[in-house]
Amino acid sequence: MLYSFLRVLVGFTLRIFFQKIYITGTEYVQHSKPQLIASNHPSGFLEPLIMACFFPKPLHFLVRGDVFDNPFLKPLLRGTNQIPVFRFKDGFSRLRENNQSIDESLQVLKNNHNLLIFAEGNTQSIKKLRPLQKGISRIAFQSLEQNPESELEILPVGINFSQFLSFNEVIMLRIGQPVKVSNYITEYNTDKNSGHHKILDDVFCAMKKNVIHLEHQERIHIFEKLSILQNLSHDEKYSPIYSNSSEMLDKAILLAKKTDNLDDEKCQMISEELRVFEKNIKSKGVKFKDLKKKPFNIINLLLLIIGFIPALAGLIFHFVPLAAGYAFMKKNVKALEFKSSILMVADLALLLIYYLILITTIFVLGLPIYIILISFLSGIWLRFYYSSWKTFSFLRTSAFDKINSDAEAILNKL
């Protein structure tokens, strides 16, 4: 009950928080067999929220055990199918509790449910798939030992964010073709270490196909600028928020490979080309980040003018909870990996409190109930208005055509 309720509530919030959510490969999610889901972990706890809300099947999760020490959080965590896993730094005594967690995980798979594991072991906000930990292969082989007839599969998942510290950004999630655990059991029975290494290597390769993987992380700034240039011609519609297109992710993965494959001399040349390009557009009053916007359009301009008043109303209604959520994140969260996660959850919690207070006030004072509807609809409009404003540019189409031409010349040199 709690899982289903939060799935609807958080799913709606994710659609508001992010500009676009691309999810593909859901056809690989099976209802008739157990599946282990191996995912990367680039951003706090947004990944389990995204997975829980958009997977076509309920999930169980292995999560950090120390969060269960909070007596207020524990019932919520348990009510949303979360299983604690303790680490060495949690203390040797806590590690023994992992036996119970493993048993619980194996029971989940025995019941033909899906178990999500963040296979890298911890979170780090980089565009790169890190080495996988043995936890996922241990559970896979133990599950098959208990149930030799099981059709257990590992689903390789990649979650990609256009930016890690931003509202109004893009999520690209892809589920890859399943890896069948039974294909590795013979090698595992012959040599356990070899079995672990073989399945982890294959799952890593399968996951890597779904992740924007830049091996040379020192080139991240070059990649990010090239990515902006590559998407100049990409017309990102606000609606629908949810899409099953993989085009944008495929292009980003290929661009990362091309950036990685540059030799040092060519990489330096591309970097210099980007510097000159940026200098040229600055001379015209255009910043690099402005290239994410679209050329001047009279219809969009009229929309911004006509829609200003209802957007302002939405801002007035929601300013206090939104500003408080942002202030809370700025004050309490230092790690990049958790900023967007905490911002979204803080805003959600404060908006729920705000609407609870608003509804109570309206009923106590006998005010018109339609105030609630006006507040809600103006808030939705504010979100749409913000997205339109962020993508609006006063640059004419002719100016963008010249920028597009110069950008394409740089991309063609990769």
Image (cartoon, grey):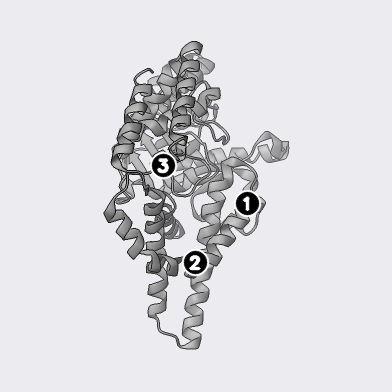
Name the residue that disc number 2 marks: 318
- Quick check: marks 2 and 1 in contact, CB under 8 Å? no
Q: Judging from the image, what secondary structure is the residue with disc 3 in? A: strand
Q: Is residue 293 visible?
A: yes
Compared to residue 350, the image places residue 278 above or below, namely above
Of marks 3 and 2, which one's residue comes earlier in the chain?
Answer: 3
The amino acid sitting under disc 2 is: His
Identity of the residue drawn at 35% across and 32% down = 403
Q: Position of residue 275 (x, y in %)?
A: 49, 26
Tell me the tag on residue 171: 3
How far apart marks 3 and 2 lie (CA) works out to: 25 Å
Q: Judging from the image, what secondary structure is the residue with disc 1 in? A: helix
Compared to residue 305, the image places residue 206 above or below, namely above
The amino acid sitting under disc 1 is: Lys
How far apart marks 1 and 3 lie (CA) works out to: 22 Å
Identity of the residue drawn at 55% across and 66% down = 320
Of marks 2 and 1, which one's residue comes earlier in the chain?
Answer: 2
The amino acid sitting under disc 3 is: Ile
Q: How many marks?
A: 3
Identity of the residue drawn at 44% across and 21% down = 259
Q: Position of residue 75 (x, y in %)?
A: 57, 57
Callout in the foreground (1, 3): 1
Of marks 1 and 3, which one's residue comes earlier in the chain?
Answer: 3
Q: Position of residue 250 (x, y in %)?
A: 34, 29
Q: Position of residue 151 (x, y in %)?
A: 35, 31
Return the residue nearer the eye: 63 or 141.
63
User: To which quarter of the image does residue 406 belong?
Assistant: top left
Q: Judging from the image, what secondary structure is the residue with disc 2 in? A: helix
Name the residue that disc number 1 marks: 330
Q: Quadrant of the N terminus?
A: bottom left
